[in-house]
Image (cartoon, grey):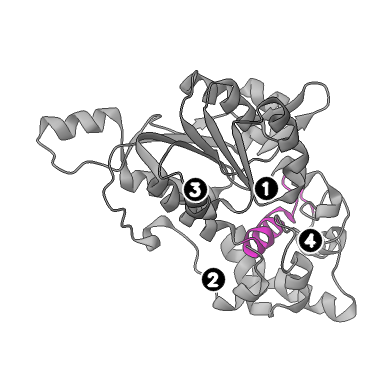
Amino acid sequence: MHSFNKSIGHIPVLISDFRKIFPKISGIWVDGTFGFGGYSKYLLEAGVEKLIVIDVDPDVKQHIDNLQAKWPSKIDFHISNFIKIKNILKNLDIKLIDGVLLDIGVSSMQLDKSLRGFSFRNDGPLDMRMSRNGPTASDFVNHAEENLIAEVIYKYGEESKSKIIAKRIVESRKKSKIDTTYKLSNIIEGISGTKNGVKKHPATKSFQAIRIAINNELNNLVFGLYYAYDVLKVGGYFAIITFHSLEDRIVKRFFNQVSKTNDQLSELKKFGGVSTPFFQKINKKPIIASEKEIKINPRSRSAKLRVVKKLSNNALLLDLKKLGLPQVSDSLRAFQCG
């Protein structure tokens, strides 16, 4: 996620920590979630020779134009989802790359624009599509079956009141179409209310769940993890930033299954370990924002940065169930835009 502070401009979360890990960068990198372009800008400043930039949101073009004006020969830009990374590289005749960066989830650019319909804090059309293509959040809440709405809100939002929220949504849409963020937010707030001392808005989990569902975010994340491994050279780096618990759980379990720390690698060698891990963890624990950064950029509070280094080209075979990917009814596909 990226934040924008009027007094100091665009701030990519955890960028200072990323700089410490990568003071200099070479070779070919992919920024699979461009956003405002803060990380891409640093990659270019740090010496990357070629940068493939990918973002599903067409609104980022104004920001990529600024970078292309300064580094016209180094940037290759694609409006696409990062799960298409293998096809994009194939079309560029690039087989393997030196690094991949992913900043998962919704960006401040999307949250802060009321017309995008991602936030309950500003009234706007109930959209939530990152790509601007396909079904909207309004289509979902107005046409999905009650059981599917409840399932999505429970599994993708971890909302304990999912069934009553789904019931109230269906009751409300019979009276009038739910087509704005305030209409949906008011329905949910009417159920949960606002408790004293509770900072989180009662609609937070439901909005998150619906956004994740229609953009197919978690399935795309899993494919992105696999494909990033496939396109990296041995010795290449994979950096990923997560925000909410569901996506972070998937990334954590993925890296725990396929990675070892420096100490663990030493132990393997000491005892004659014959199986080379897929990745080496650069940081034992995820990097989180400092109190100073949180004061400047409150949205960095939940951010976690993980960095790994590829060690082998062994075939990557994992049990998807062990990643903790929520299983949702196939009927959701009719309402997904990504």
Verify whether residue 96 appears in magenta: no
Element type at mark 1: loop
Q: Position of residue 158 (x, y in %)?
A: 59, 59
Lower sequence index among marks 2 and 3: 3
Foreground disc of the pair 2, 3 = 3
The circle on residue 62 is: none
Amino acid on which the number 1 mark rests in the picture: Val
Lower sequence index among marks 1 and 2: 1
**Front-most of 290 and 251?**
251
Q: CA distance from mark 1 to mark 2?
A: 21 Å
Amino acid on which the number 3 mark rests in the picture: Leu
Q: Which residue is mark 1?
A: 106
Q: Name the image quarter holding residue 279.
A: top left
The circle on residue 127 is: 4
Instruction: Give the residue displayed 47% in from the left and 56% down from the top.
Output: 223
Element type at mark 4: loop
Element type at mark 3: helix
Q: CA distance from mark 3 to mark 1?
A: 25 Å
Lower sequence index among marks 4 and 1: 1
Amino acid on which the number 4 mark rests in the picture: Asp
Q: CA distance from mark 2 to mark 4?
A: 21 Å
Q: Position of residue 59 (x, y in %)?
A: 77, 47
Q: Which residue is mark 3?
A: 89
Foreground disc of the pair 1, 2 = 1
**Front-most of 69 and 271?**
69
Q: CA distance from mark 2 to mark 3?
A: 31 Å
Lower sequence index among marks 3 and 1: 3
Foreground disc of the pair 3, 1 = 3
Q: CA distance from mark 4 to mark 1?
A: 13 Å
Location of the N terminus by quadrant is top right
The circle on residue 328 is: 2
Is 233 situated above or below 165? Answer: above
